[in-house]
Image (spheres, grey):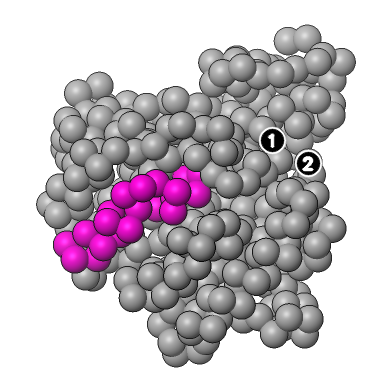
Amino acid sequence: MKSLKAQNHSLANPEEEIQVLEGNLPGGKFDFRHHLETIGLFPLRPTPLEIFQINVGKMCNQVCKHCHVDAGPDRKEVMTKETMTQCLSILAKETSITTVDLTGGAPELNPEFRWFVTEIRRLRPDVKIIVRCNLTIILANPKFYDLPEFFKINKIEVVSSLPYFTAMKTDAQRGEGVFEKSIQALKMLNAVGYGEENSGLIINLVYNPSGAFLPGSQNELELEFKKKLWDRYQIKFNSLFTITNLPISRFLEYLLRSGNYENYMEKLIDAFNPVAASGVMCRNTISVGWDGYLFDCDFNQMLELKVDAPKSQHISSWDSSALANRSIVINNHCFGCTAGAGSSCGGTTV
C-alpha cells in the first residue's frame, strides 16, 4: 500500500474506510484475524446476549471532531416508531438482555424518544436503560429542560462525553461553548439526585483522547476528574469511562489528514492485549441501526458491516438461534478495542 502520510484524504463512504483499514501497513503483517488466530480466538463467537444497543438516529445538535457516527444537525436518519416497536418485541422475548443502551446522535432528538423509553421501562422494569446524552441537548431548547426529571422518573443511567475538565480542551473537541453548557447540564442532573451516593441515579462520564494516542489509566483519570469537577464546580458523578478512539469516520479522516494513521495503528497493534480480546463488547451485544439492521457493535454499524447471519440481518427477521451461532465480523479497526486495558462503550474491559 502506498504511504498514507502524503495523501490528501476525504473519505466519502464506509467502503472507502474499509479499503484503508484492510490495506497492509509497512511489513504486511498487521491484520486483526491473525492476532485472534494466534491466541485461539478465531473465529470470534458471541456469548449470551446481555446488551441491546439501539441507535435511534444520527441527528445531533453537536458536530464533535472524534464522532464515529458522523452525527450532526444535518443528519436526517431517524428510527421510526415501527422499528422501535419491533425492538420492543425482541426485548420482551429475549429475557437474557439486562441492558438497553440508547444512543445516537443525540437520542433525545428522535420525536418518539420519550415514548420509547417509557415503553421499555413499562415492558421490562428490571432492565438497565442507558441513555448516551451529550449534556448540551438539555439546554438546546426549553422542551428539553425537564430531561433530568424524565431520566429520574424512568431510572435512566446517563452516560455523557466530557473530554476534559477544562473549557479549552473540551471545546476544541466538541465545539465552542460546549464545556460551559455541559457544566450547567451536569448541575441540573445533580440537582435531581444524579451522582449522589445511594440515590440509585447514575451519571457516568466518558473520556476520549483528543489526539492520536491511547487513553491513560481509567482509575487515575477518574480520581482527577472527580477532584477537579468538585473543587471548581461542585459537580458529582459516579464513574469515568475511558474509550479508545477507533480509526473510523471523522477520527480516521483526522488520522489520514494529519499523517498519523500508520503511527496510530502501530500503537494499537503493539498494545494488543489477549485478555482484552476475550472480553470485547461485541461478544455479548447486538447493535441495532436506526433503520433496524443488526450489527455486532456500534463501530461495525458505522462501517455498515452487518451481522454474519444472512437470514437475520434486520430486526424484523430476528432469529435467536442464527444470531447465537454467528461468527462476529472483524476488521482492523477492532485493534482499538483490544489495545492496553481494552475499550468498550462501558470503558476499559480489563
Count neighbours of disc 2 (C-alpha within 10 A) and say few if under 14, some if 14 to 19, many if 20 or more. Answer: many
Work out which residue is located at the far top of the displayed protein and give it. 2
> Observer-nearest residue: 26 or 112?
112
Instruction: Tell me where the magenta segment starts and ends, as one range.
Output: 102-123
Disc 2 is placed on an element classified as loop
Residue under pointer 1: 251
Q: Residue at x 22, y 59 (%)?
A: 119
Q: Residue at x 40, y 70 (%)?
A: 151
Which quadrant of the view contains residue 246? top right
Residue 277 position, x and y percent, is 52, 46
Which of pointers 2 and 1 indicates the residue nearer the eye?
1
Residue 101 position, x and y percent, is 39, 55
Work out which residue is located at the far left of the displayed protein and give it. 93
Above or below, 34 against 190 in this view is above
> Observer-nearest residue: 263 or 303?
303
Residue 137 position, x and y percent, is 55, 57
Residue 218 position, x and y percent, is 66, 65
Residue under pointer 2: 212
> Observer-nearest residue: 274 or 57?
57
Q: Quadrant of the N terminus?
A: top right
| Side (left or right) of 198 relative to 256 | left
Q: Residue at x 19, y 66 (%)?
A: 122
| Side (left or right) of 132 relative to 252 | left
Q: Can residue 132 be seen in this view?
A: yes
Question: Principal SS element in the magenta part?
Answer: helix
Disc 1 is placed on an element classified as helix
Q: Which residue is drawn at 60% across and 21% down?
A: 17
